[in-house]
Amino acid sequence: MPPKDDKKKKDTGKSAKKDKDPVNKSEGKTKKKKWSKGKVRDKFNNLALFDKATYDKFCKEVSNYKLITPTVVSERLKIRGFLARAALQELLSKGLIKLVSKHRAQVIYTRNTKGGDAPAAGEDE
């Protein structure tokens, strides 16, 4: 019987060590990384149709920009992209802006200089 007592003493010593370790481990577990909410994008409230004030501003200002793209016009005047593309086509037909480059996804215009009415490089389409 005495050997059983020795085992119990050894077990109690081991269990005391085991008790200390889970306490330390549980403190580490409480500091879990929280899930992030993710990125929140700002909702654009751009105009789908021109109102009189915006159209007047468009006609006056856009023809003076050095670099004119639908994206630039959309950001500065707070209008939708399709509206910017259509309005820039109108300015091009009036001759107020000049086509620099036309790609299937991107159209680049510049202000029309009074002296140079030569066709632009990408205008052969």
Image (cartoon, helix red, strand yellow):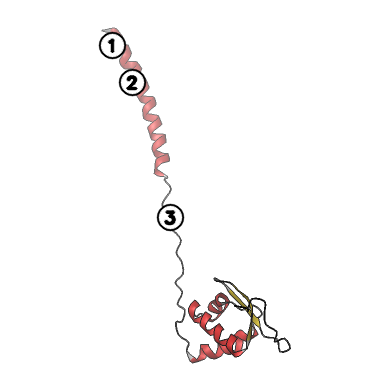
Residue at image position (30%, 8%) is 3
Q: CA distance from mark 2 to mark 1?
A: 12 Å
In the picture, residue 5 is in which quadrant?
Answer: top left
Residue at image position (44%, 82%) is 48
Q: Quadrant of the C terminus?
A: bottom right
Q: Which numbered dot is residue 115?
A: none
Residue occupied by mark 3 = 36
Q: CA distance from mark 3 to mark 2?
A: 44 Å
Helix, strand or loop at mark 2: helix
Q: Amino acid at mark 2?
A: Thr
* Of callouts 3 and 2, the N-terminal one: 2
Helix, strand or loop at mark 1: helix
Q: Amino acid at mark 1?
A: Lys
Count of all numbered marks drawn on residues in the image: 3
* Of callouts 2 and 1, the N-terminal one: 1
* Callouts 2 and 1 close, C-beta under 8 Å: no
The residue at the far right in this view is: 115
Q: Position of residue 87 (x, y in %)?
A: 53, 84
Q: Amino acid at mark 3?
A: Ser
Q: Is residue 44 above or below residue 3?
A: below
Q: Position of residue 118 (x, y in %)?
A: 70, 84
Q: Quadrant of the N terminus?
A: top left
* Of callouts 3 and 1, the N-terminal one: 1
In the picture, residue 30 is in which quadrant?
Answer: top left
Mark toward the viewer: 3 or 1: 3
Residue occupied by mark 1 = 4
* Callouts 3 and 2 close, C-beta under 8 Å: no
Q: Position of residue 61 (x, y in %)?
A: 61, 86
Residue occupied by mark 2 = 12
Say which of 113 and 32 sits in front. Answer: 113
Q: Is residue 56 above or below residue 47?
A: below
Q: Is residue 28 visible?
A: yes
